[in-house]
Image: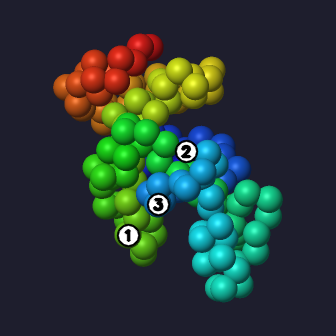
Amino acid sequence: MALVFWIEPVPTYDLDVLVFLPEPTGAIVSLDRIYEWARKRNYRIDKEHIVIGGIPVQFLPAHNEIADEAIETAVAMAYGNVEVRVVRPEYLIALYLEPSAKTLKRRERTAALLDSGKVDSAVLQTLMSRFKLTF
């Protein structure tokens, strides 16, 4: 969904929300607190999604330093009448280029972001170097 703010809209099923969660006590990160929050507010839960305002929302725990920084550097933008924090395009590219996430679809989105003219190339180059990412 962040792409809507930086490039032309692309089809998507859900809205992904990066979140900070407490350190896991075991090997698996638990989203129980988020689902409990949703249940108390009568949001419908559909598999891994919480349906908010008719939109399936998937909460994704920040899984590494890139994701942490993506959350910390997100910019405030307006979505209709609601202020939302949106991951900057340089961090979207960095997240897309992580070896475990480097799919054809994400490479295509990376290309679209690069073509948008909205990417700060110095910031992107620093991220690529720091996290040893490649196109």
N-terminal label among 1 and 3: 3
Q: Position of residue 46 (x, y in %)?
A: 79, 64
Residue at disc 3, secondary structure: loop
Classify 76 as above or below 43.
above
Residue pointed to by mark 3: 22
Q: Nearer the viewer, mark 2 or mark 1?
A: 1
How packed is label 2: few (under 14 Cα within 10 Å), some, or many (20 or more)? Answer: few
Q: In the image, what residue type sits under mark 3?
A: Pro
How packed is label 3: few (under 14 Cα within 10 Å), some, or many (20 or more)? Answer: few
Are the two marked residues, 1 and 3, in contact with CB atoms closer than 8 angstroms?
no
Can residue 92 be seen by looking at this rendering? yes
Q: In the image, what residue type sits under mark 1?
A: Glu
- Total marks shown come to 3
- Identified at 37% across, 51% down, the residue is 71
Q: In the image, what residue type sits under mark 2?
A: Pro
Q: Gap between marks 2 and 1, in whole Å? A: 19 Å
